[in-house]
Amino acid sequence: MAERLSLPGFVNAHSHAFQRRLRGRTEGGDFWAWRESMLTEAERQTVDGIRTEYAAVYREMRSAGYTAVGEFHYRGLQEALAALEAAAEAEIDLVLILAAYEREGLPRFRQESVAAYLRQVESLRVTGARVAVAPHSVRACSAGWLEEIGRYAAAEGLPLHVHADEQPREIEECLAEHGVRPIELLARTGCLGPQTSVVHATHASGGELDLLAKAEARVCLCPTTEANLGDGFAPVAALRERGIGICIGSDSNVRIDPLEELRELEGIARREGGQRNVVPLDALLAYGSAEGAAALGMQVWPEAAVDLGHPSLRGVDQADVLGALVFGCAADVFAG
């Protein structure tokens, strides 16, 4: 049997498993055109379909080296329970990130009140499920909802995840409604803190990044999805300069490969800075594992095993295995 190397498992801190069905079907157009296709797919989802499809997606993640996942879920309570069952079947550790939706999106996404949303969170917690709260975005939640969810997360010690600054239009709309940018609104409403993970932050201003640093919040970068949707370039160097924690997610699941996420993250930093090794290797690996676990409130999670006999590692000296893994291998290097 080929020798194996055990590593901390990779942690997928941001996934929309149902979007895996869009792979290859939605090329062309911009983010907003893709979003319409995504909403159409979301509308057709059933509880039984979620249980079956998510189990397949989670097995794909497991075989790719992810051993834990945060599922950012916005399709109803029974569907959330089906996602939990799917994760158990696929033997992947899951944190259910339940999205609050006051407005926009589809009717099935929305709760009638923020109190109703928090009751959903409580009903999941009593099952023993690991749960995080998530105002979907400043587009989907008013300032009043943000304040209530931020207060609840702080009081209960729960992780809080939120999409912000992914698209310029989102920023323009936030400025028009609130007079401030998205992350500034999150700070104003009490949604920024050490347990907060802002997803994307692609177009965050320097001032917004300063707010994240002050709050000791994290940013979850999803480089393969951000590239696929034409979101822009993650501000990797600016995040590192401020000491802001970074984790990764497969997001739309157009690709499921933590090594590719980390390569793209470092590649962005190299191309923008004109130099190599911007992010040290140990930091990259931490972004893929420990930082993601911390973003999900996990203290322990399963390991992943690297097949050292894989052809991608042929001729690589032992001292160079980790570098070769990140920069020269695909997800099939992980042993089942």
Image (cartoon, rainbow, N blue to C red):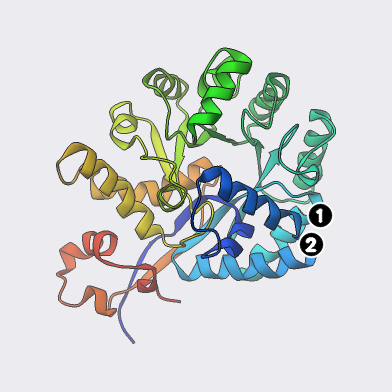
| Residue type highlighted by circle 2 | Val
Where is mark 2, residue-wise? 47
In the displayed structure, does residue 23 sit left or right of residue 234? right
* Residue 39 sits above or below residue 245 on the image: below
Give how far across and how far down residue 277 sits, in percent.
18, 46
Towards the viewer: 121 or 209: 209
- Residue pushed farthest bottom? 1
Give how far across and how far down residue 149 sits, in percent.
69, 27
Question: How far apart are labels 1 and 2 at the CA level?
Answer: 7 Å
Q: Residues within 10 Å of mark 1 (few under 14, many from 20)?
A: few
Towards the viewer: 25 or 336: 25
Give how far across and how far down residue 53 sits, in percent.
66, 68
Numbered label attached to residue 15? none
- Residue lying at 78% horizontally and 62% vertically, measured from the top left: 46
Residue 106 figure quarter: top right
Disc 2 secondary structure class: helix
Tell me if I can see residue 294 in this picture: yes
Where is mark 1, residue-wise? 78
- Residue lying at 70% horizontally and 59% vertically, measured from the top left: 83
Q: Quadrant of the N terminus?
A: bottom left
Towards the viewer: 233 or 64: 233
Tell me if I can see residue 302 in this picture: no
Tag 1 and tag 2, C-beta contact below 8 Å = yes
| Residue type highlighted by circle 1 | Gln
In the displayed structure, does residue 238 sit left or right of residue 10? left
- Residue pushed farthest top? 179
In the displayed structure, does residue 192 sit left or right of residue 79? left
Q: Residues within 10 Å of mark 2 (few under 14, many from 20)?
A: some
